[in-house]
Image (tube, grey):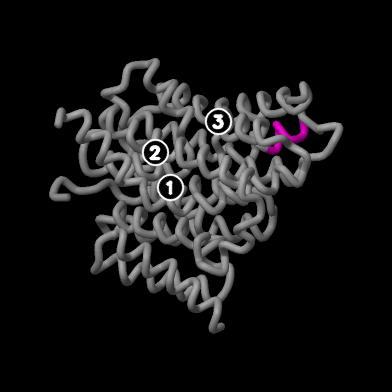
Amino acid sequence: MSAETVLTIMAMAIATYATRIGGVLLGAYLPRTGRVKQGLDALPAAVLTALIAPAVTAGTPEMLAGGITVLAALRLPMVAAIGIGIASAALLRGVL
Amino acid sequence: MPAWKQEFKSGALAIAPLAAAAVPFGMILGAQALQKGLTPAEIMLMSLTVFAGGAQFMAVGLWQYPVPWAGIAFAVFLVNLRHVLMSASLVGSMGQFRPWQRWLAVFVMADETWATAERRAAVQPLTVAYYAGIGVALYATWAVSTALGTLLGGLIHNPEKLGFDFAFPAVFICVVMGFARSWRAAPVILVSAATALLVRHLAGGTWYVIAGGLAGMAVAAALPAPGRGR
């Protein structure tokens, strides 16, 4: 292993861990009442939605597959909905 | 079976679809790293210490010799900034964790780990054993698939063709729908998605995750407080 590579990887690891522990340290100071609580309660849904928005709107096949996944998730167990989502993305990309 | 073993197993099973979907990408990462001149031991070290798929792909893409280490580390920091929001939220559900367990837990907090843990925390208290099951399963899978990529090289070229890349949005769609238990979720989701797409279009990079997340949270905070009947 070369020294510069190991140094770079260690710098990457520290940068990544800093973001992950940063929230733990910050979280201790956040009030969890009133409007702040309402906002924090919505964080998982809001951040996940933002994270996947580009992938789901990347093209027509992805938008359709996203819609199919939503419908499947309304009725079916999660594993089935995921399988249907993946299969529909693959099929629609082949067709469209 | 002791209760903690049951919890560990439940956690590992809960993340299994996401771990399976990560395999082809770990393999591609391993193969790409070799092409860039990294040795198998070096890319393994990266997967074991950084453990952040998106950031690792970006770093390998930027890799050259001499290694621009400061630029790569800064880019990794920016790509992973969303984790500040994620761990700030998750720590609110880590009441059963000792301080050292929190510090260790967030070391393996990738997007998938976080989403699976939040999903659990929404329905019942998050135990250390359940989180350990999630974390160990994904960490081990990522390490093994990176190693496979260095051994098997470019066996997998185009996982998009088989829809593997869509596993992440598909799982996260299901997770978001699990969070959406009242009408309040609709404006949050719409504003998050619209803001994310707009910021990505205007600014590029990865700021869109944080911008979309904060916009959705702002909407949630501005909505009238839930009544007692809810």
Residue assigned mark 3: B48
Residue B178: x, y in percent? Answer: 29, 54
Residue assigned mark 1: B19
Q: In the image shown, does B40 or B172 lie closer to the viewer?
A: B40
Chain of the residue under label 2 = B
Outermost residue to the right: B66
Residue A18: x, y in percent? Answer: 57, 26
Q: Are marks 3 and 1 in contact (CB under 8 Å)?
A: no
Q: CA distance from mark 2 to mark 3?
A: 13 Å
Residue B35: x, y in percent? Answer: 75, 46
Q: What secondary structure is marked by label 2?
A: helix
Q: Amino acid at mark 1?
A: Ala
Magenta residues span B70-75
Residue assigned mark 2: B137
Residue neighbourhood size for the residue with mark 3, other residues' Cα within 10 Å, grouped as few (<14), some (14–19), many (≥20): some
Prevalent SS, magenta region? helix
Q: Amino acid at mark 3?
A: Leu
Q: CA distance from mark 2 to mark 1?
A: 7 Å
Q: Amino acid at mark 2?
A: Ala
In the drawing, does residue B120 fall left or right of residue A64? left
| Mark earlier in primary sequence (2, 1) | 1
Q: What secondary structure is marked by label 3?
A: helix
| Mark earlier in primary sequence (3, 1) | 1
Quick check: do tags 3 and 1 share a chain?
yes
Q: Residue at left 64%, top 61%? A: B157
Q: Residue at left 46%, top 22%? A: A25
| Mark earlier in primary sequence (2, 3) | 3
